[in-house]
Amino acid sequence: MCATCGCSDDAGVRVTEPGHTHEHGHGHGHGHSHSHEPETRTITLEQDVLAKNNLLAERNRGWLRAKEILAINVMSSPGSGKTTLLTRTITDLAGEFPITVIEGDQETLFDAERIKATGAPVVQINTGAGCHLDAEMLERGLATLAPPPNSVLFIENVGNLVCPALFDLGEAHRAVIMSVTEGPDKPLKYPHMFAAADLILLNKTDLLPHVDFDVDAFLADTRKINPAATVLPLSATTGDGLAAWYTWLRTHSTHAQVQSAHT
């Protein structure tokens, strides 16, 4: 079991390009168990795991910056519309800048195949019983994907509002996607996830007339948790609000390139 989140650490991680399979005899990247250890040992293991992850994350971050790649860690619960938003974004912004995707799921190539259909390069990382991506998994994914310089990399994390918030991957920004069908109380129930985000995308706003969702209450609770985050309501299905999302992407992509040029 993982000391930080309780997920299994004997799951076989697979890094796959659609149409190609690469098996890795890799556990969860933690190499430990603590089923009968005292609490103090669990805390030590958690610190060790996160310390190792953070070192690898900094290495990833340096590699991405050197290539002027804007990496965005996209997190949410299952069914929020992450893949739908990414496929729409890739299609709408085709030709503006290269976009590549690393897909994280416990099993299947379903989402990677959807991304592949847009023409964007994609690699699938299946975590088995693991509930999040970590920096080592991203490092392997980058080696397989080889995103080009001056591009945007979306890292679609495993659907989960808890564990992905703990693990720095080396990304430049963290975006949390939440749909109005999930209820407005998520920022208060999962504060660590929302506190870690630079950007919060409130998706499926086209369904607001049909669900009990208080947008003002959601915004107020979000501000309590993270007053600095940008919050953008949108619908990946209808396209409402996507212009603001695309402006955010263009602005941060240019900023990433300028930053890299001066480091």
Image (cartoon, grey):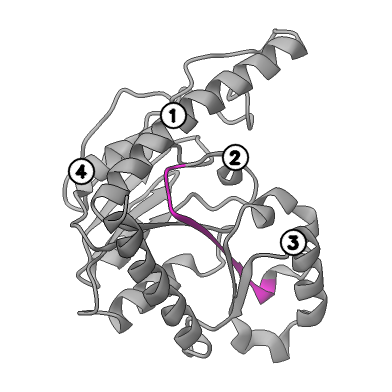
- Secondary structure, mark 4, is helix
- Residue that numbered label 3 is attached to: 186
Decide: marks 3, 1 in contact (CB < 8 A)? no
Residue 154 relative to residue 191: left or right: left
Looking at this view, name the residue that lies furthest to the top: 37
- Residue that numbered label 2 is attached to: 166
Residue 4 relative to residue 219: left or right: left
User: What amino acid type should be assigned to the residue bearing mark 2?
Assistant: Leu
**Is 18 inside the magenta-drawn segment?**
no
- Residue that numbered label 4 is attached to: 144
Crowding at mark 3 (Cα within 10 Å: few <14, some 14-19, many 20+): some
User: What amino acid type should be assigned to the residue bearing mark 4?
Assistant: Thr
Q: Could you say which is closer to the camera, residue 166 or residue 7?
A: 166
First-in-chain label (4 vs 2): 4
Instruction: Identify the image quadrant of residue 3.
Output: top right
- Secondary structure, mark 1, is helix
In percent of width and height, residue 113 lies at 28, 61
- Secondary structure, mark 3, is helix
Quadrant the N terminus occupies:
top right
Closer mark to the observer between disc 3 and disc 2? 2
First-in-chain label (4 vs 1): 1
